[in-house]
Image (cartoon, helix red, strand yellow):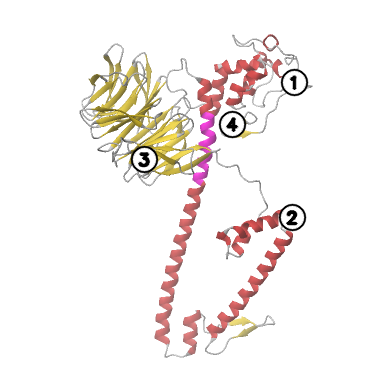
């Protein structure tokens, strides 16, 4: 998160802000230039916000201090501070500034700064919306991913320039070869015609043009004899050796005295230490010749690639255990593996799940994962769900048989849900001796995705329908029909976001069991959206079109970054700022805040 000493405005990190509220200010704080001065700034304070003189128990609230400003002005100033500072630091300063954390209008002003006035936020209902959490997440998302997007764009531009240079060099080589072939043909045709024709073919000279070089007195002298080309090459080699000698003298001078003082010698030593610059002569020297600059701050995120040791594609990835420390991977090689992301540069294998003497975790493709607390569930094409105890090192926790392949899972505190190829949603109470609670048939085709809480179950079927089931009333509350089927779903708060088979993104509102379609967005995916994760201030999507996108969850979504992969992406997981992606092959990419 941004440090309290840094002010954040949109995607710009502002200079340090230090305000001593206990010292009298000789001049009152003036509003920013874009605010209209005059009587408008003296409007009465909103209800629920006491005046600074009454609220602050300390002598900080002097009439000429910061807190003497109108409340609207104070909230405007605070909107330039990091959200983390407003939430955790200002309440410790005095009671009045602590009220900023409770002022929803101040958080809405901040959100509008981050998103822009044209986008709608939140997309769903505004009642009971957690504005502080949304702003905290959005600021962190922008800091991490907008810089990453700029870095990736620079790399893509550099790769394109290098590719263009390679193409130009190849084209020049082809033209040169073609020219040499033409010259060879002319030379063969004129070989019997005498030396003048040979000269014209070799050098491209006209009849009246003489080939000359410089002698030691810098005078132009004609070249005579049959070894003209050899003598010319010998002379050019001597000139090159002289130039190299001059370069070496200049390099020695830079090492001793430096172009910019001591920094010049240091930069040159670093240049020589780089193996890529050895033998590179002038090129390496010119790369170090510009004046020294302060090093750019490292990217806020680092990416590690887990070589999962799976021998087939990874279908599902899930961060478990809290704080993004452990990653579970499920593969078509019939296995589920647990990885410690805190150990090693690419993670360390903790366990390959399975009982004693078991060769595999399952007996078919492991298609989906779900977790709650210490319980991990894996669903497979072998018509089974297996349970694992994470606290016991991935020990076997149970086996549940289904009537067909398991395509999706949802793990709640009191029930485990599984959507199957055979159109049904099966509910289990994993704490009971007889775990099966009931089976629901809500769709006319395979159940592709699930989301649930303690009251409702929301499911998407391949029959292009979305169903809402009330767990307490034991009945279907609503059923919607779409133009394409949903493949992935994320449900939090009062919003449901889902990706369909055509690359489109849907947003729904969910209140009191009523599911309403809000919007349908094209965020740039050109194929099935295989994964969605939405929180108050972040939105992640991945697709079989080989891309992963990071957005702000507004209407329309504001895409901050697009990551490209070699094959279709099959799933994602987000936890505590850590972002894991099943890249569609045997590896998993994990993005996390840099330490």
* Helix, strand or loop status at disc 2: loop
Is 87 in the magenta? no
Asked if the residue at tag 2 contacts the one at tag 1, i.e. Cβ–Cβ closer than 8 Å, the answer is no
Label 3, residues with CA under 10 Å away: few <14, some 14-19, many ≥20: many
Decide: is 182 above or below 4.
below
From the top left corner, tell me how far across and down residue 153 is, in percent.
Answer: 49, 45
* Magenta segment: 138-153
Label 4, residues with CA under 10 Å away: few <14, some 14-19, many ≥20: some
Residue that label 3 marks: 569
Alpha carbon separation for disc pair 3 and 1: 56 Å
Report if residue 289 is visible in the image. Answer: no
* Helix, strand or loop status at disc 3: loop
Alpha carbon separation for disc pair 4 and 2: 36 Å
Residue that label 2 marks: 261
Q: Which residue is drawn at 64% across and 21% down?
A: 90
In the rendered view, does 6 fall on the left or right side of 228?
right
Alpha carbon separation for disc pair 1 and 2: 46 Å
Report if residue 593 is visible in the image. Answer: yes
Alpha carbon separation for disc pair 3 and 4: 31 Å
Alpha carbon separation for disc pair 4 and 1: 28 Å
Residue that label 1 marks: 28
In the rendered view, does 217 fall on the left or right side of 541?
right
Residue that label 4 marks: 2
In the rendered view, does 337 fall on the left or right side of 403?
right
Which quadrant of the figure has residue 405? Answer: top left
């Amino acid at each position: 998160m941004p440090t309290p000493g840094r002010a954040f405005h949109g995607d710009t990190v502002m200079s340090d802000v230090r305000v001593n509220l206990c010292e009298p200010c000789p001049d009152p704080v003036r509003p920013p230039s874009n605010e209209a001065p005059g009587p408008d700034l003296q409007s009465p304070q909103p209800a629920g916000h006491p005046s600074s003189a009454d609220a602050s128990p300390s002598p900080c609230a002097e009439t000429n201090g910061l807190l003497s400003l109108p409340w609207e002005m104070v909230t405007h100033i605070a909107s330039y501070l990091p959200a983390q500072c407003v939430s955790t630091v200002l309440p410790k300063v005095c009671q009045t500034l602590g009220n900023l954390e409770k002022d929803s209008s101040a958080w809405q002003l901040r959100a509008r700064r981050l998103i822009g006035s044209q986008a709608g936020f939140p997309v769903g209902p505004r009642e009971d919306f957690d504005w502080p959490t949304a702003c905290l997440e959005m600021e962190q998302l922008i800091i991490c991913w907008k810089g990453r997007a700029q870095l990736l764009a620079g790399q893509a531009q550099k790769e394109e320039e290098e590719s263009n240079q390679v193409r130009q060099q190849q084209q020049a080589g082809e033209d040169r070869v073609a020219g040499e072939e033409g010259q060879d043909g002319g030379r063969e045709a004129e070989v019997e015609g005498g030396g003048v024709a040979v000269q014209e073919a070799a050098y491209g000279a006209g009849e009246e043009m003489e080939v000359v070089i410089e002698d030691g007195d810098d005078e132009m002298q004609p070249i005579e004899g049959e070894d003209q080309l050899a003598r010319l090459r010998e002379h050019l080699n001597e000139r090159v050796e002289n130039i190299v000698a001059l370069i070496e003298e200049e390099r020695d001078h830079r090492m001793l005295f430096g172009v910019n003082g001591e920094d010049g010698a240091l930069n040159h030593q670093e240049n020589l230490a780089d193996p890529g610059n050895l033998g590179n002569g002038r090129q390496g020297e010119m790369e170090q010749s510009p004046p020294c600059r302060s090093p750019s701050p490292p990217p806020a995120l680092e990416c590690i690639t887990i070589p999962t040791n799976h021998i087939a594609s990874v279908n599902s990835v899930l961060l478990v255990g809290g704080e993004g420390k452990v990653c579970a991977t499920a593969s078509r090689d019939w296995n589920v593996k647990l990885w410690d992301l805190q150990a090693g540069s690419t993670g360390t294998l903790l366990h390959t799940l399975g009982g004693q003497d078991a060769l595999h975790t399952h007996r078919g493709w492991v298609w989906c994962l779900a977790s709650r607390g210490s319980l991990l569930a894996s669903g497979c094409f072998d018509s089974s769900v297996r349970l694992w105890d994470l606290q016991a090192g991935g020990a076997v926790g149970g086996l549940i048989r289904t009537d067909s392949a398991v395509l999706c899972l949802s793990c709640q505190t009191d029930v485990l849900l599984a959507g199957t190829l055979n159109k049904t949603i099966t509910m289990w109470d994993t704490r009971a001796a007889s775990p099966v609670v009931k089976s629901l048939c809500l769709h006319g085709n395979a159940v592709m995705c699930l989301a649930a809480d303690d009251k409702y179950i929301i499911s998407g079927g391949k029959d292009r329908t979305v169903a809402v089931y009330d767990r307490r009333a034991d009945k279907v509350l609503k059923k919607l029909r779409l133009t394409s089927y949903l493949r992935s779903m994320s449900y939090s708060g009062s919003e449901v976001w889902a990706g369909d088979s055509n690359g489109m993104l849907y947003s729904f509102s969910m209140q009191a069991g009523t599911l309403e379609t809000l919007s349908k967005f094209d965020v740039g995916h050109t194929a099935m959206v295989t994964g969605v994760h939405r929180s108050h201030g972040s939105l992640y999507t991945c697709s079989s079109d080989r891309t992963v996108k990071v957005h702000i969850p507004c209407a329309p979504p504001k895409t901050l970054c697009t990551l490209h992969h070699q094959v279709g992406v099959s799933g994602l997981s987000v936890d505590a700022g850590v972002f894991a992606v099943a890249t569609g092959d045997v590896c998993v990419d994990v993005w996390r805040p840099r330490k």
